[in-house]
Amino acid sequence: MELDFIRWLVQRVSAQSAGACLIGDDAAVLPREQFRDCVVATDLLADGVHFRLSEVGPEVVGRKALAVNLSDLAAMAAKPRAAFVSLLLPEGSAAEIARRLLEGMFPLADQFQVQIAGGDTNVWRGPLVINVAVVGDADPNRVWRRSGVRPGDALVVTGRLGGSILRHHLDFVPRIAASQYLLAHYDVHAAIDLSDGLSLDAWRLAAASRCAIELDEDAVPISEDAARLAQISPQQGTAWERAMNDGEDFELLLAVSEAESRKLMLDENLGLPCSLIGRAVRGAGLWLRSSAGELREIEPRGYEH
Ligand SMILES: [Mg+2]
């Protein structure tokens, strides 16, 4: 299976925009740009744990496996360059699944000029397991960390949150373009991508920065899918609770100065909606400010791995 697959892959990769490295040698060689840091992210997804292959199909799984990694690079203000794909394939239809996984990945890779630069395949009797690692580069002085939030900062989130299980978690666009735009035009102090729910990821940002974050209850942007799900199954939470706690939004949560946040709220070039949802203050933990101005501490309730 491997030889045929590699042959197909080499052809397909050559068709990608001319890159500096190609599959075929013992290892990939990535040319280094001067004065840039190398930023690496990796993610492992398994059939039956993170997705059901029989329900969504290999193309969707391949796309998502790359997209979640690109979202992590976006959160660091890194520009993606190459991806490495390792597959543990179920016996029987291994070659077909491998091909379709990659076919699902290529359009997204092309969109963000990511070269599929290597990887490995093996066959076994178990379910599909896929690992994607991505390499990006970033300005060493301007990488966004979780630990950079300062008391007084404004908290801004891209997009609308919650209900991703309906479809967004499979077809989301990683916020690479927004991240590169923000990097060029704003001084972002800290960032995280929302993979496990706003409440948990905001709490993580606060903890890493050793400060407290206050979220304004009325400012949390609720997606249409969160509202729809709250109607379909109200026992599983209100639309607002879904926006706070549902995972896999893959939006960016950013800390910027108050002045920068005012500029950002009026910026029409970002290309996606953006909401000012709170602020950082001295202290610890995650706090919620009601419309009446009452403050209460809340427990993060997102998805824990
Ligand atoms: Mg992340």
Image: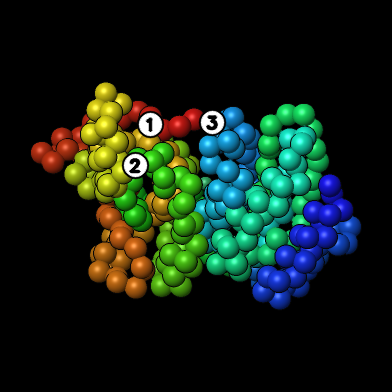
Residue displayed at 66% across by 51% down: 100
Question: 10 Å neighbourhood of mark 2: few (<14), some, or many (≥20)?
Answer: many
Question: 10 Å neighbourhood of mark 1: few (<14), some, or many (≥20)?
Answer: many
Tell which residue pokes out farthest to the right in this image. 26
Is the C-beta separation of discs 3 and 2 under 8 Å?
no
- SS for dot 3: loop
- SS for dot 1: loop
- SS for dot 2: loop
Whether residue 118 is visible to the viewer of this picture, yes or no, is yes
User: Residue 287 at what x, y percent from top left?
Assistant: 28, 36
The residue where tag 3 is placed is 305
Residue 67 shown left or right of residue 185 in the figure: right
Q: Earlier in the sequence, mark 2 or mark 1?
A: 2
Residue displayed at 25% across by 69% down: 266
The circle drawn on residue 162 is: 2
Is the C-beta separation of discs 2 and 1 under 8 Å?
no
The residue where tag 1 is placed is 300
Mark 3 belongs to which amino acid? His
